[in-house]
Image (tube, helix red, strand yellow):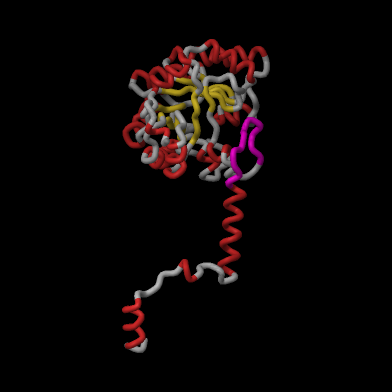
Amino acid sequence: MDPRTEAVSKVTVPSILERKLRGEKIACLTAYDYPTARLVDEAGLDVVLVGDSLGEVVLGYESTLPVTIDDMLHHLRAVRRAVKRALLVADLPFGAYHVSAEQAVEASLRYVKEGGAEAVKLEGGRKRSAIIRALVAAEIPVMGHIGLTPQSVHAFGGYRVQGRTPDSAAELVADAREVEEAGAFAIVLEGIPRELASSITRRLRIPTIGIGAGPDCDGQIIVFHDLVGFGFGTAPKFVRQYARVTDVVREALTGYRGDVLAGRYPEDRESYHWPASTRELFERVGA
């Protein structure tokens, strides 16, 4: 059965909050284009995130920092056309909310009106509380994101696990509480020790969504390309690859090239033919 035809026909912000109360896990995944988003949605994922990670896995940047609002909207609109059941969330990219709350609201309104987003995600803890409050006041649901926040790569000095010391762990607990109090409906915990993620999850009323934060979060999210093994380089420690799409595609491309060069593609069965009447006419006129 197509999961999109089940009793819960549409995942919403309230239904995500209810999952926390019922102790039910939340399955989330990224998507950046129509065919991927359609497969993800039909598989029954609860949340589809159009992440600024598209900068790395789709656009070829070395980080998420160059991604623009227009980049995000282009991919968001494609994903929106595919997603019917899941809650559709989109990342605010670096620079889209760092100047003022008004800037964040303006960008988020575009996401909702032009891209069909149902919620936005932004990185940062207590320092983002005023922005979260402004977005919630504008009736735009917000997903928070603390821990290893990729947009802070330069400040962190690289992609480093956060919250390893008592002081930094306490800072992240305070960040999580403030994000909740500001009105976020969920919060991503990225790149933090399992014990800290478990502690934060127990303290919050809103769901925690883990990525590299252990199994005790209320839900999990991962980058689609990491999950299916469609990319280059070494995957992070927390990634479980359920397929190796890169190998399949590489084999297909090599096979295609070889068949073309050897004259094996296309074969007669892969070619179109005239109907008998056209062939006879063509022969009669001596063409």
Residue found 37% across the figure and 26% down from its top:
7
Residue range corresponding to the magenta coloring: 234-245
| Residue that extends furthest to the top in the rendered view of this protein | 203
The image shows residue 50, relative to residue 182, as above or below, that is: below
Instruction: Residue 91: give x, y in percent of width and height.
Output: 46, 31
Q: Viewer-proximal residue, 172 or 151?
A: 172
Quadrant assignment, res 101: top left
Q: Mainly helix, strand or loop, the magenta region?
A: loop
Q: Specify the quadrant of the image occupied by residue 150.
A: top right
| Residue nearest the observer in this picture, 35 or 190 | 35
Where is residue 82 drawn, in percent x and y? 39, 40
Tell me if residue 91 can be seen. Answer: no
Task: Classify 82 as above or below 215.
Answer: below
- Which quadrant of the rendered structure holds the C terminus? bottom left
Would you say residue 239 sits in the magenta stretch?
yes
Q: How many marks can you see?
A: 0
Residue placed most toward the observer, 252 or 234? 252
Question: Is residue 43 among the parts visible in the rendering?
Answer: yes
Q: Residue 123, percent across and down?
A: 50, 25
**Is residue 243 shown in magenta?**
yes
Quarter of the image holding residue 69?
Answer: top left
Q: Residue placed at 61% from the left, 27% from the top?
A: 212
Q: Residue furthest right?
A: 165
Residue 165: image x %, image y %?
A: 68, 16
Q: Quadrant of the N terminus?
A: top left
Q: Is residue 192 left or right of residue 25?
A: right
Residue at position x 43%, y 18% from top? 17
- Name which residue lies at 59% across and 70% down: 262
Q: Nearer the viewer, residue 251 or 58?
A: 251
